[in-house]
Image (cartoon, rainbow, N blue to C red):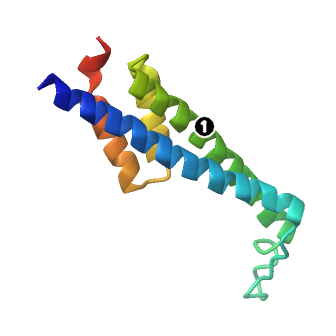
Amino acid sequence: MNEGRGGLLSAGGIISIIVGVFEFLVGSVMVASMWVSIPFTCPVTSGFEGICDPSLILSRLIIIGAVLAVLGIIAIVGGVSAIKRRSFGLSLVGAICALLPINTLGILAVIFVSLGKREFE
């Protein structure tokens, strides 16, 4: 019975790491796109000039990408903590960071780490 819980905790940690790597990669690509200066065109031009400002779009893209990259790093660190059974709090925070982009794997990571709480004690 104890082996099943350890398996769930390890699965939660691995899922946190996988989601964290994807978050970090996507966030890094979004931030790197600033230097590439991908040109944006506004599909609708009447009345939406402020919304389709290329510098505004790039700044929002950079902010969202940086937040995703940081969430990814925290998810990776939390996943490693879950696998090594070091800190339940850090493991749960990592799983929650994997959950924040709202995906099924993040939900599973939170559930598995929560069910494995006794492994830390």
Q: Establish if 34 lies above or below 69.
A: below
Image x and y of residue 51, in percent: 75, 72
Question: In this view of the protein, which residue sits in the foreground, 12 or 68?
Answer: 12
Would residue 14 be found to the left or right of residue 34 on screen? left
Quarter location, residue 59: bottom right
> For this rendering, which residue is in front, 84 or 24?
84
* Above/below status of 53 relative to 85: below
Task: Please tell me which residue is depicted at 48% across the width and 29% down the height of the picture.
Answer: 80
| Residue 25 pos. (x, y %) | 64, 52
Which x, y percent locates residue 11? 33, 39
Residue at (48, 47) in percent of width and height: 18
**SS for callout 1:** helix
Amino acid marked by disc 1: Ile
Q: Quadrant of the C terminus?
A: top left
- In the picture provided, is 105 more to the left or to the right than 23? left
Camera-side residue of 19 and 58: 19
Residue sitting nearer the eye, 2 or 35:
2
Residue annotated with mark 1: 73
Identity of the residue furthest to the left in this view: 1
Q: Where does the N terminus fall, quadrant-wise? A: top left
| Picture residue at 85% right of the left edge, 76% below the top | 39
Q: Is residue 88 above or below residue 20?
A: above
Q: In the image, what residue occupies the spot 43% across and 46% down?
A: 99
Q: Residues within 10 Å of mark 1 (few under 14, many from 20)?
A: some
Name which quarter of the figure residue 84 lies in.
Answer: top left
* Residue at the limit of the structure toward the front, as seen here: 3
